[in-house]
Amino acid sequence: MARATTLPAAIRLLVLDVDGVLTDGSLYYGPRGELLKVFNVLDGHGIREAQRAGIEVAVISGRDSAAVRRRCRDLGIRHVFQGIAEKLPVLERLCRRLRVLPIESAVIGDDVPDVPMMQVVGLAFAVPDAHEAARRAADHTTRARGGRGAVREVCDLLCAAAARGPRKAGRPRAARATRAAGRKRR
């Protein structure tokens, strides 16, 4: 049975993977073996806008990284879980703690470990270069790649829907045009 998707305006929690979503998936090692990551400022601004719109933002990552802790601290992301092999139980606990239903949550993922979360949330997004399993589990694939504005793209969608409110968010553009054309004929 297919999973029901949620209108973007109903999303109260956005969960992000890191490698391949907040970053381009590349791992850079410094001369002393330290792991370096590159983050996109557009994504950061999108996260801040989502937070201002009342959407909680969380990070659930399979790796543990000081760079991720720092970036999340800079962005005011309070829910940061790293070194997580099984992400779904963490998402479920977070939803209970925040009193948010999984159907009121969205996930941006790019690989097999993200799929269980993507299968239970209201809206699942994949980046275009995601693993095939993640793309199949997604309701939408972003145009922008991970680490290159994909998070911003999703945040912009959620913020625009939140600003329109729940009623207008679910009305497709074609349906509005059809109704408008019908009114003109009367």
Image (cartoon, grey):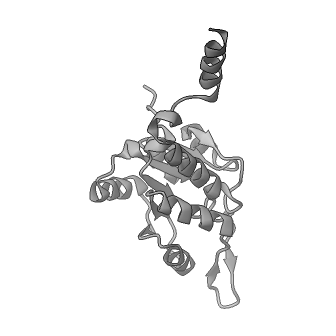
Q: Nearer the viewer, residue 74 or 95?
A: 74
Q: Nearer the viewer, residue 20 or 74?
A: 74
Where residue 93 sits in the image (x, y, percent)?
30, 57
User: The C terminus lies in which quarter of the figure?
Assistant: top right
Where residue 14 sits in the image (x, y, percent)?
47, 55
Which residue is painted at 66% across and 47% down in the image? 142
Q: How many marks?
A: 0
Which residue is painted at 44% across and 32% down in the image? 3
Q: Is residue 28 above or below residue 117?
A: below
Is 46 on the left-hand or right-hand side of 81? right
Q: Is residue 17 visible?
A: no
Where residue 178 sits in the image (x, y, percent)?
63, 18
User: The N terminus lies in which quarter of the figure?
Assistant: top left
Is 39 on the left-hand or right-hand side of 16? right
Q: Is residue 157 visible?
A: yes
Q: Is residue 50 above or below residue 169?
A: below
Q: Is residue 124 above or below residue 66?
A: above
Is 164 on the left-hand or right-hand side of 181? left
